Image (cartoon, rainbow, N blue to C red):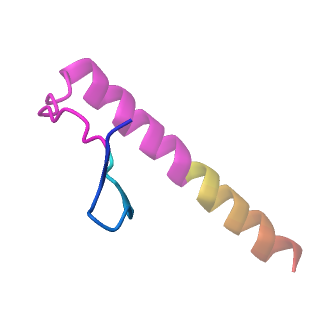
Amino acid sequence: MLYTTDDRGILNNYAVEPTIYLAEYPTPEQQKRYAFGGALGALLVFAILFITFSVS
């Protein structure tokens, strides 16, 4: 743990900064999976809305 104290004895805690890295662009296979998941999620939302409006 990193900490320092000043001349009055007050404790100053500093957060440890994580290492920074650049994100990698998704592969075409990952892009297809993201598109499929988004389409599946949209279909689920539309199905729930359809059921909700048809019941009420």
The residue that appears at 87% across and 80% down in the rendered structure is 56
Residue at the front extreme, as displayed:
7
Q: Residue 40: say if magenta.
A: yes
- Residue 2 position (above or below residue 42): above
Query: Image check: 24 left or right of 17?
Result: left
The residue that appears at 71% across and 60% down in the rendered structure is 48
Residue at the right extreme, as displayed:
55
The residue that appears at 11% across and 33% down in the rendered structure is 22
Name the image quarter holding residue 25. Answer: top left
> Which residue occupies the foreground of this view, 20 or 42?
20
Whole-percent x and y of residue 52? 79, 71
Q: Where does the N terminus fall, quadrant-wise?
A: top left
Query: Image check: 54 left or right of 44?
Result: right
> Which residue occupies the foreground of this view, 3 or 56?
3
Residue at the bottom extreme, as displayed:
56
The residue that appears at 60% across and 61% down in the rendered structure is 46
The number of numbered badges drawn on the structure is 0
Whole-percent x and y of residue 12? 34, 58
Q: Which residues are magenta?
A: 16-42
